[in-house]
Amino acid sequence: MTIVPVEGALLEDILDHTFPIWNEGLSRSSYARWNGAQLRTPWARTHLQRYASVDDSGQWLATAKQYRFDVRLNGRDGWMCGIGAVFTPPERRGHGHASGLVEELVARAGREGALVAGLFSEIGSDFYARLGFAVVPLDEVTITVAVGRRGGAPAMLVRAGEERDLENVAAMHATRAADAPFALRRDRDLVHYALAKKRLLAGLGPPGLRQLEFFVAEEGASAVAYVVVNVNANGWTLEEAGDRDPAGARLGAMLQVLLAREPSQRTPLIRAWWPRAFPVPPQIQLTDVSVPKDLFMIRPLADVAMPTGADDAFYWHSDHF
């Protein structure tokens, strides 16, 4: 088995195979454009690569994406080898091709100094547990926002987020995640990648299927709170948020403003992955706490203590890969 980067005709064949399960409502051509555009973002050009294992005849056996995320783990700065989009063609399953590819990518990362390997499993924990990965539970919650005084919204300026806000977004994340045992170290380029990935998905999909909304509250021409919301027919997914206010009150007020935009509409169901280290704004209540169906799993690659529970990890839905 040989591991090769995926490009050209090999990429098109892999996209043909993975399109039926991971198309997210896109057409086949839009699915290819979505994948290609992600790789052209500044962050992905140096932090994301798709690989495949091939046999002696050149036939591909399995494929996976490898990410390089900067992380802080129990006070130690380093990087995480992220593994995603693991796939084996149906006719080649049952021969250990996927596990062999994952093992090789993780082993390479370990030799290059990665602290940890991580992935999200949508097939339960058993398969990856056999490869040394363990579940780190995260909190998925329902957000209920209190109605503002007299049924209205607070008087605050909320505007669409812009490129110039990304540095402040990264700074807010760094402040909130500083005390968490495990968190991504999100710089401007990673924030941009997370937004671009969702925006591209919304823009390339059928009209009205989904939309991504990025809003900030500002003071003195600087963003001091923000929220990213994915909207579809099932409601809202709060992808990520931040607030310089230690109590998170600006974020709560922003959500009140956003919900008051269309008072005749039914209040949407709002779900989020809510880091326990992030304050719960006084205007909202978190209920229906559960573990996400896509399980976050990690494997140690260095001599450093691993996160074991939701108290240990600072992770937003935007950080899913």
Image (cartoon, rainbow, N blue to C red):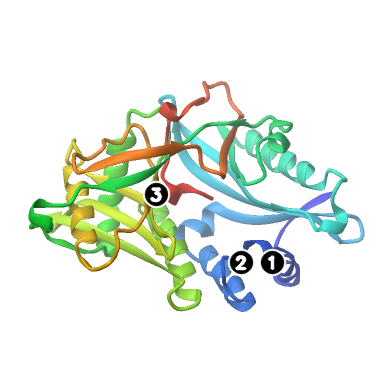
Q: How far is disc 1 from disc 3 in space, using C-alphas?
A: 26 Å
Q: Which residue is mark 1?
A: 20
Circles 1, 3 touching at the beta carbon (< 8 Å): no
Question: Residue 120: where, in percent of width, then height?
Answer: 58, 44
The amino acid type found where label 2 is placed reads: Asn
At which x and y percent is residue 314? 40, 36
> Do residues under tags 1 and 2 come within 8 Å of each other at their CB atoms?
yes
How far apart marks 2 and 3 lie (CA) works out to: 22 Å
Q: Quickly name the residue at label 2.
A: 23
Q: Which residue lies at the image location 67% right of the left edge and 44% below the top edge? A: 123
N-terminal-most mark, 2 or 3: 2
Rendered view: 106 above or below 3: above
Would residue 114 be visible to someone looking at this image? no
- In the foreground, 225 or 190: 225
Residue 16 in the image, given as x and y percentages of width and height: 72, 70
Q: Secondary structure at mark 1?
A: helix
Residue carrying label 3 = 271
Question: Dot 1 surroundings within 10 Å: few (below 14), some, or many (20 or more)?
Answer: few
Q: Left or right of 267: which side holds 83?
A: right
Q: Amino acid at mark 1?
A: Pro
